[in-house]
Image (cartoon, rainbow, N blue to C red):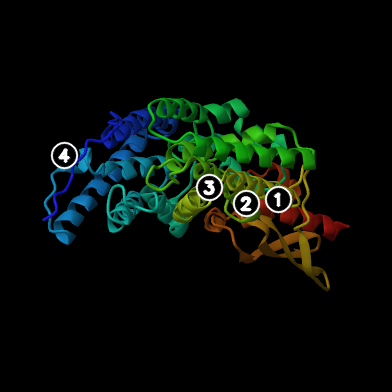
Amino acid sequence: MKKFKVRKGNFLKSKNSTSNMMYNLLICLIPFIIFATYKNGIYPVIKGYGNLYLVFKPLIFVVIASFSCIMVEYLYYLIIRKERKTFNYLFSESFALIPGVFIGLIIPINTPIWLLILGSMIASLSKMLMGGLGKNKLNPALVGSLFITIIFSSFAGGYLNPLELDTISSATPLANMTASSYVLTYDNLVSPYGNLLDFFFGNIPGSIGETSSFLCIIAFIYLVVNKVIKWRIPISYIGTVIIMSLIMCLSKDIGLWFIGFNILSGGLLFGAVFMATDPVTTPISHEGQIIAGILLGLLTMAIRYLTPLPEGVLVSILIVNITTLLINYFSVKLFSKRWIEVGIIIFLLLIVGGFSFVIGSKIHNKEIDDSYKIISKQKDNNTTTYQVSGRGYTGSNSIKLKIVFKEDDIIKIEVIESNETYMKMIFNNDYLEKIISNQDNLDDLDTISGCTYTSKYIKEIVDKTMKDYFE
């Protein structure tokens, strides 16, 4: 019988355990929870908007989402695996609350509680069904957030807290860009929210806790120093967005402020620091991490500017999660040769440049509205009936109206077709009747708070139709 030989080997032991990494992650998220509570709760109430519930609403969201994730894992172990896990295990070893904390920070402030719970359950199930901590191929928080903001978008509610709803009365910066048909001017994209410093510190509409780029940079430094995240992914991700933005600036004569707008808008920095660096769902090699970052930047900009979706971070990270196994495979098979890995990165950068020019063909640096169209115009004695279409919040030709003139006055406005999410608010506020009543002074007619762009664009369509009629 052969004897096994046991030899002493060299082993490296690191104090940077999974527990330490997760605790450091939670420490970094505390300032975001505090900021979200102040921005969306305390400050609006100080200014006279909301009540005591609003003060604690961001914190309540985080607590409810985390508790929901913990309960789903507990029941999954108990019912499916026939194991009774203690809450200490779920908290300190499975880290069941982590997806819940993230979901509480990256969803709209007006999300109903029932949808928050449902999204948290989906997030936790996506983690457990793939094998639990360390085996999930997709970021659980992003799966839950995708479920809330895309699949159930009609129930998710808006991103504006009560103060923003009354004082800004507009969508998030990226949604505003989409709604304005990609007219990239400083006055159109930045001025409605202040200046780029407001973007940097997070004083803009957006998800509950991801708007502060300042906190994201501090968190990035802390997590890299403590070896919790891989710095190559955020740097290559943000660097790709900077390169694409710069090419768009130069090709379309847009100011360099546009680079800052792309970096500081939406959840790009939050996603780059916290979501794209999940150690389970990201490539293992240095080259693979750089490639993943380039792909993230490319996908984010393509989704923002070539699709109806105003924000591309969430979807981009999930797509790269799916491709991680492929990137790892090529990392092992091909990247042993330096010229191959350099060639692949150069190839991706060429694609980045090409896509930048493709995106540039869609954007404008001045107000251009070619979406207004007179579909038909019928005269019958002293009555003229128009059917017209024009731009709405969801894009070009998303609103179609029937406008009837009689003896030089509008007597009827009817919505024939609409893709607008908030058109119901137009009807509930009798806004079409108000336009008819104020047709001689449309500029003095206020838009509807919470439905600003749809009401604004309807006014513009009616105004253009009136100009054609009187010409």
Q: Does label 2 or label 1 sit earlier along the sequence?
A: 2
The kind of residue tagged 1 is: Ile
Kindly identify the residue that appears in the image at 22 percent across and 35 percent down: 8
Q: Residues within 10 Å of mark 1 (few under 14, many from 20)?
A: some
Q: Secondary structure at mark 1?
A: helix
Q: Nearer the viewer, mark 3 or mark 4?
A: 3
Q: CA distance from mark 1 to mark 4?
A: 50 Å
* Residue 169 in view: no
Q: Secondary structure at mark 3?
A: loop
Q: Residues within 10 Å of mark 4 (few under 14, many from 20)?
A: few
Q: CA distance from mark 2 to mark 1?
A: 7 Å
Residue tagged 4: 88
Residue tagged 1: 359
Q: Does label 3 or label 2 sit earlier along the sequence?
A: 2
In this rendering, position of residue 214 left or right of residue 399: left
Residue 335 got which mark?
A: 3
Residue tagged 2: 302
